[in-house]
Image (tube, helix red, strand yellow):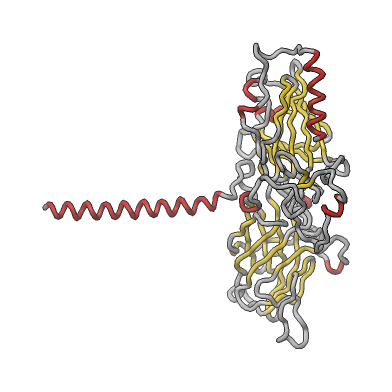
């Protein structure tokens, strides 16, 4: 009897061990899937739709369209790069609206030479100004795709591809594998292609509907952790009711030395600065950031200044400064999270869109520059900043300047989460509570401190 119980206990122990091991494996695998999760854009992704439009003697003609369903993350110059691996021995006979970077070995073809014979082709968008006979709709923008909220009309990119040696029916065609997307650097992870219901198309007169022969989708999600090891932006804070200016945390974006080698920083007084900033390089190459030497070492700093207090309103000034000598940020955007963003009265010189990542929660806003005015954030230097002011209406039941309430909970720049100062360093109210009256000394000193802070 005793041996029976001992055997039972041993069996239960083994089962418990394997149960715990299975739970551990499941939880470990879940970590990788949540790396790309964005709390402010939980459903954001880039979806590729591959529509087989017609059959050819040895394959098919397809239209491939990428939709950027990310609310505030866009793909900037030099644009996207798409890759995959063919399931069989397919070749690309021709392309419209895009091209492969290499042709590969097509020596076995004697007459008509394919556009690409590589097992794993790499595709890039064509540049603006491409002849019309080589274009299709949504092509030829140099691979640039805007975010869905900022400009949905330019949030898609398409090309046409003629594939050979691929099969000529739904049952003989095999979907490609191992899709990769660079935008323009790393960060995107693509899932497997999934065959879905064929896409339907409505004619311009809306009186006839056609459909693709076959359609499959590929979904790619972004992870800031995979994109770069260090953050790309930081946040500094100040207020009219405290003389303290809270700078970005030290080495917020990594500590570097003061040399001209790759990954180093530059002093703005460096002689022959232009030759150091722009070394000879292959066109379209993504250069690492070359930042101005600062305490935080970030390419971008966002400064949030609580500027004024009125009876029913309060005002904030936002300044975005570019410390990167190698990059002009075009079509930039900023996302801020603050409980009073549901009550914006007026915003100056920026566009504004309220984001509601979750039903009933309206504490997030997206800001971006006005086209042809300040949507271009110049490289590091005297012109490397943009700024705006926001006027909020107070909700007397929640409004306060105490405990850092007036400062943002989270800031994103171009889709990347910025490093915030530690909460215990935020400017605090003077002892005795908030008063509108300030000493003459404080009123004079604060603007002087802010001037020297931004000129540093």
Q: Is residue 171 visible?
A: yes
Closest to the observer: 228 or 150?
228
Question: Which image quarter: residue 123?
Answer: bottom right
| Residue 105, x across and y down, in percent | 71, 80
Q: Residue at x 12, y 52 (%)?
A: 2
Question: Which residue is located at x 76 percent, y 74 percent?
Answer: 94
Residue 151: x and y in percent read: 77, 47
14 relative to 71, above or below: below
What residue is drawn where x is 75% and y is 64%? 124
Where's the C terminus, which quadrant? top right
Q: Count how many numbered circles sit on residues in the image.
A: 0
Up-down relation of residue 5 to residue 191 (above or below): above
Q: Position of residue 295 (x, y in %)?
A: 71, 38
* Whether residue 362 can be seen here: no
Left or right: residue 409 versus residue 109 is: left
Residue farthest along the left direction in this orientation: 1
299 is higher (above) or lower (below) than 129: above
337 relative to 308 in the view: left or right:
left
- Which quadrant of the figure has residue 353? top right
The foreground one among 449 and 41 is 449
Q: Quadrant of residue 42?
A: top right
Q: Nearer the viewer, residue 127 or 148?
A: 127
Residue ranking furthest to the bottom: 110
Task: Report x, y in % for residue 234.
Answer: 69, 39
């Amino acid at each position: 009897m005793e041996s029976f119980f001992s055997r039972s206990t041993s069996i239960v122990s083994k089962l418990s061990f394997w149960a715990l091991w299975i739970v551990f494996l499941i939880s470990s695998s879940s970590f990788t899937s949540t790396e790309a999760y964005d709390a402010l854009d939980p459903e954001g992704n880039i979806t590729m739709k591959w529509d087989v439009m017609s059959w050819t003697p040895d394959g098919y003609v397809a239209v491939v369209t990428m939709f950027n369903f990310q609310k505030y993350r866009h793909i900037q110059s030099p644009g996207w790069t798409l890759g995959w691996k063919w399931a069989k021995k397919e070749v690309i006979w021709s392309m419209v609206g895009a091209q492969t970077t290499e042709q590969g070995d097509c020596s076995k073809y004697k007459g008509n030479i394919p556009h690409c014979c590589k097992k794993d082709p790499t595709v890039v968008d064509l540049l603006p100004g491409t002849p019309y006979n080589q274009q299709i709709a949504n092509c030829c923008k140099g691979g640039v795709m805007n975010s869905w909220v900022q400009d949905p009309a330019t949030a898609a990119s398409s090309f046409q591809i003629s594939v050979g040696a691929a099969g000529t029916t739904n049952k003989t065609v095999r979907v490609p594998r191992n899709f990769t997307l660079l935008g323009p650097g790393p960060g995107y992870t693509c899932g497997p292609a999934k065959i879905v219901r064929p896409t339907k198309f409505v004619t311009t007169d809306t009186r006839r509907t056609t459909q693709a022969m076959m359609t499959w989708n590929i979904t790619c999600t972004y992870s800031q952790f995979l994109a770069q090891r260090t953050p790309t932006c930081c946040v500094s804070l100040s207020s009219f009711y405290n003389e303290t200016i809270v700078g970005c945390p030290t080495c917020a974006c990594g500590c570097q030395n003061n040399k001209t080698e790759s990954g180093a920083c530059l002093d703005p007084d460096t002689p022959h600065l232009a030759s150091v900033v722009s070394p000879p390089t292959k066109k379209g190459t993504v250069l690492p950031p070359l930042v101005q030497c600062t305490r935080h070492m970030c390419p971008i700093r966002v400064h949030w200044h609580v500027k004024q207090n009125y009876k029913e309103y309060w005002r904030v000034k936002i300044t975005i400064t570019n410390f990167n000598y190698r990059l002009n940020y075009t079509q930039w955007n900023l996302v801020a999270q603050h409980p009073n963003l549901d009550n914006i009265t007026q915003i100056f010189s920026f566009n504004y869109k309220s984001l509601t990542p979750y039903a009933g929660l309206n504490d997030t806003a997206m800001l971006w520059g006005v086209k042809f005015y300040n949507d271009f954030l110049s490289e590091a230097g005297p012109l490397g900043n943009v700024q705006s002011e926001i006027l909020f209406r107070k909700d007397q039941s929640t409004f306060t300047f105490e405990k850092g309430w007036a400062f943002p909970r989270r800031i994103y720049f171009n889709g990347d989460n910025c490093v915030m100062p530690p909460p215990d360093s935020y400017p605090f109210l003077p002892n005795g509570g908030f008063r509108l009256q300030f000493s003459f000394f404080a009123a004079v000193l604060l603007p002087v401190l802010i001037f020297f802070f931004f000129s540093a």
